[in-house]
């Protein structure tokens, strides 16, 4: 068994984390969060979402955030885009990359973005075409890859089908989301084996929420299969407002502690991430979700 030598971390805290906080953080604090994250060695930060403000008021200042951040060279600043209107908004503020998102469950896409899986692809097609013309890379998400809050069990083949459609449409990387954190190792293996039949391993990312404390061991299972891209959120922020009970993303600092312990390079300074975890937890007035951050203090 060979683990990867290097792993890319996709930091989703400013987007996936803050979208699910009950309080709306001030724009300046979001900007400070992203700028601090930019100085930790992270190369990829999902900064916000160009979705409807009435559905996700927490990220209603997407333009302001994207325009205000002092960008660090070598760091990619991306954002979620649900439809053409979101794509146009992202262009106006020079978003480096975008991510489109769908799911392996129709029931979930209906609740999340008010359309079926097929309709998602109709919305994405013109976005992918225009993004290609403008040399903007597009990431794709498949939610409910290990279970759906509405439909329950999800077949690995259903995940593979949607992942392949995104890839064939032009998404360079497909992030497989355990949106409600219900997955366990055997399910991760079965799902990844199915996806790896239709996608190159380099194009696969895992995005695990930690509701049942399984995220790290599930990541280890993914690493053993060769996955080299991991989504995580500083301080374990996160969740999906359309998935009741979904808790935070796996904490970036917990992932780094595990990866560095395995001798896997990330290029990220764990201590600096822990400082950012304290910063954002103080701003939100709650203790960091991450055991590593709690153990290490400030
Ligand atoms: P809709 O209601 O079906 O669309 O929303 P609509 O076209 O009928 O528009 C409704 C209103 O929204 C209109 O305004 C539009 O102009 C406006 P009104 O006429 O009522 O004043 N609108 C927009 N405004 C700003 N930006 C836009 C936009 N589009 C329409 N882009 C829509 C469809 C997708 C917009 C809506 O359902 C939405 O925003 N949903 C939010 C979904 C979301 O952000 N979910 C969380 C992220 S996904 C996630 O967390 C999972 C992930 O982390 C992976 C995992 O964990 O599995 C990625
Ligand atoms: Mg998520």
Image (tube, rainbow, N blue to C red):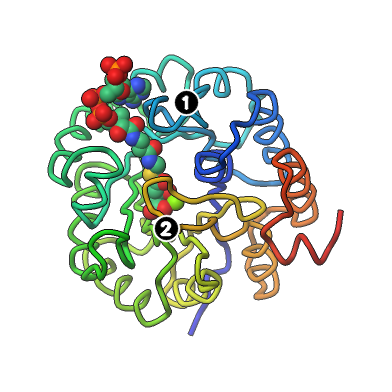
Q: Which residue is mark 1?
A: 95
The answer to whether residue 171 is above or below residue 146 is above
The image shows residue 210 at horizontal and vertical percentages of: 52, 65
Numbered mark located on residue 72 in the image: none
Which is more N-terminal, label 2 or label 1? 1
Q: Looking at this view, is 116 or 177 the one in front? A: 116
Q: Residue at x 16, y 44 (%)?
A: 116
- On whether ligand 1 comes within 8 Å of the CB at mark 2, the answer is no
Q: Looking at this view, is 254 or 201 the one in front? A: 254
Residue at disc 1, secondary structure:
loop
Quarter holding residue 160 = bottom left
Q: Looking at this view, is 107 or 130 the one in front? A: 107
Q: Residue at x 41, y 61 (%)?
A: 180
Badge count: 2
Q: Which residue is mark 2?
A: 205
Q: Residue at x 52, y 32 (%)?
A: 58
The answer to whether residue 144 is above or below residue 138 is below
Quarter holding residue 253 = bottom right
The image shows residue 279 at horizontal and vertical percentages of: 77, 42
Alpha carbon distance from label 1 to label 2 = 21 Å
């Amino acid at each position: 068994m060979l683990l990867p030598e290097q792993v890319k971390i996709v930091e989703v805290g400013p987007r996936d984390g803050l979208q699910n906080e009950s309080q709306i953080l001030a724009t300046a604090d979001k900007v400070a969060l992203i700028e601090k994250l930019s100085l930790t060695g992270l190369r990829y930060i999902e900064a916000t979402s160009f979705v409807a403000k009435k559905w996700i008021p927490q990220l209603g200042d997407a333009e302001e955030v994207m325009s205000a951040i002092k960008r660090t060279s070598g760091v990619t600043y991306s954002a979620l885009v649900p439809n053409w209107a979101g794509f146009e908004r992202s262009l106006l503020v020079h978003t480096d990359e975008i991510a489109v998102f769908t799911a392996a469950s129709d029931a979930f896409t209906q609740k999340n973005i008010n359309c079926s899986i097929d309709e998602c692809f109709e919305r994405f097609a013109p976005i992918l075409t225009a993004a290609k013309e403008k040399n903007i890379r597009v990431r794709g998400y498949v939610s409910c890859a290990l279970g759906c809050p509405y439909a329950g069990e999800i077949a690995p083949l259903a995940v593979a089908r949607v992942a392949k459609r995104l890839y064939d449409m032009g998404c360079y990387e497909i992030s497989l989301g355990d949106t409600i954190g219900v997955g366990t190792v055997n399910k991760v293996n079965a799902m990844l084996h199915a996806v790896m039949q239709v996608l190159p391993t380099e194009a696969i990312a895992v995005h695990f929420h930690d509701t049942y404390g399984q995220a790290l061991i599930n990541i280890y299972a993914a690493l053993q299969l060769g996955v080299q891209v991991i989504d995580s959120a500083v301080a374990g922020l996160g969740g999906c407002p359309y998935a009741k009970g979904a808790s935070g993303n796996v904490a970036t600092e917990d992932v780094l502690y595990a990866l560095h312990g395995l001798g896997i390079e990330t290029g990220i300074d764990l201590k600096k991430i822990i400082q950012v975890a304290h910063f954002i937890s103080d701003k939100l007035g709650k203790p960091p979700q991450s055991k590593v951050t709690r153990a290490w203090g400030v």
